[in-house]
Image (cartoon, helix red, strand yellow):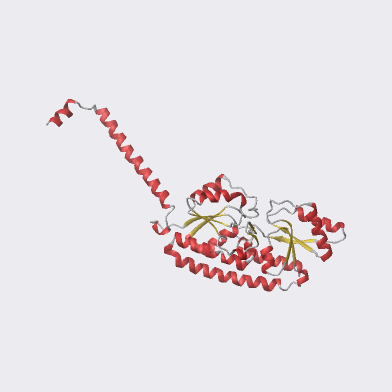
Amino acid sequence: MSGLRSQTHYPLPVSRRLALFVIAIAGLIISGCSQSADEQARAASVPLDKFAGGRPIRVVCTTGMVADLVRNVGGDRVHVEQLMGEGVDPHLYKSSPGDLSRLDAADVIFYSGLHLEGKMAELFERIAARKRTIAVTANLAHDRLIGDENSHDPHVWMDVALWSETTQTVLETLSEFDPTHAAEYQSRQSEYREQLAALDQECRAKLAAIPAERRVLVTAHDAFSYFGRAYQTEVRAIQGISTESEAGVREINDLVSFLVERKIKAVFVETSVSDRNIQALIEGCQSRGHRVTIGGALYSDAMGAAGTPEGTYIGMIRKNVATIVDALK
C-alpha cells in the first residue's frame, strides 16, 4: 500500500509520461537498427555458409589477369570487381577514393604481388590486418621466379604454365572462406588448369615456327622475361621491369646497335605503355640506314577490353603470340 500511496503522492504529469514513453520506443528502434548494422558488418567477414541468403563472395582484384583467374576458379560463387581496366599500367597506379570504398566492402581481396602494384603495397598491408588480402603469386617457389631475393620480376603471367600454379592460392583461399562449395572450386580449378596446359602447348608450337635467329622480341619495358624463358625467345627491352624506371640515351643507343647488327626488322609497342621510346628506337635505326617497323601492339600489364577475346587471360596470350609470329616469321 505504501507503494501505491507513494505513486499517488507524486503523480507524473500526463504530458511528461507520454514524452518518456515516446523516448523509450525511439530508443528501442534505434537499438534495433544499430544491432542490425552490426550484424551485417559481422556477416561480411564470416564464411559464406553462415549467410542465410548464400550471396556470392564479394571479391576485389587489382589487374585484369588476377580478376580473370578468380572468375575462372570461383564461377558464379564470386562477384568480382576489378580496379585496373584496359590499358592501365599497374606499376604507376594510385588508388582512388572509390577504390578504397570497394576494398572496404570486399570479403576477399586478390592482387598480383611481387611489387607489381607498387604504389598500393602499404595499403594492402594495412587491410590484411582485418580481412583476407592475398597475393596470388605468394606461394610460387622462389627458384621459379626471375630476379633476386629482394627484387623479383612480377610479370609471372607471361609464362602460362607458371601462372597456372597461382590458381592453387585462389582455390585454397576461396575454399577456406566458403568450405561448403570447396568441391565446386576444386572442379573449376582443375578444368581451368587443363585449358591453360593446352594454351601453353599451343604457344610453344606456334613460336617454334619462327626461325631461332629471328625469334627476338624487342619491347618498351621488360615485361616478357618469363615469356622468353618459357618459349625460347630472346627478349630485349628499353625500360626495366617497372615503367617507373626511365630509359636513358645510352640504353636506346645500345639497343639501336643491337637491332642494326642483328638485322632485326620489327619491334613491339605495348598497350599499357607509351610508345615514345619505341619511336626513338625506330628513328635511331633509320639514322643508321636500318629500317625497323612496329610489329604490333602487345598486351603486357593489362588485358584488352571487357567483352573481347583479349579481355580474357587466354585470349590475351593467344593474341600476343599471333602478333609476334606474324611479325617475325
| x, y percent for residue 132 | 49, 55
Image coordinates of residue 184 in percent, x first then y, are 46, 67
- Residue 100 % position (x, y): 54, 47
Residue at image point 73% right, 51% down: 246
From the viewer's side, name the closer residue of 178 and 137.
137
Q: Quadrant of the C terminus?
A: bottom right
From the viewer's perspective, is residue 188 above or below residue 87?
A: below
Any part of residue 149 in sight: yes
Residue displayed at 49% across by 59% down = 78
Question: Does residue 3 appear to the left or right of 82 in the view shown?
Answer: left
At horizontal 60% and vertical 72% (from top left) the residue drawn is 198
Q: Quadrant of the N terminus?
A: top left
**Does the rendering let one see residue 102?**
no
* Location of residue 31 with respect to 17 vertically, above or below: below
Question: Residue 250, percent across and down?
Answer: 80, 54
Which of 56 and 114 lies nearest the eye of the viewer? 114
Q: Residue furthest front?
A: 149
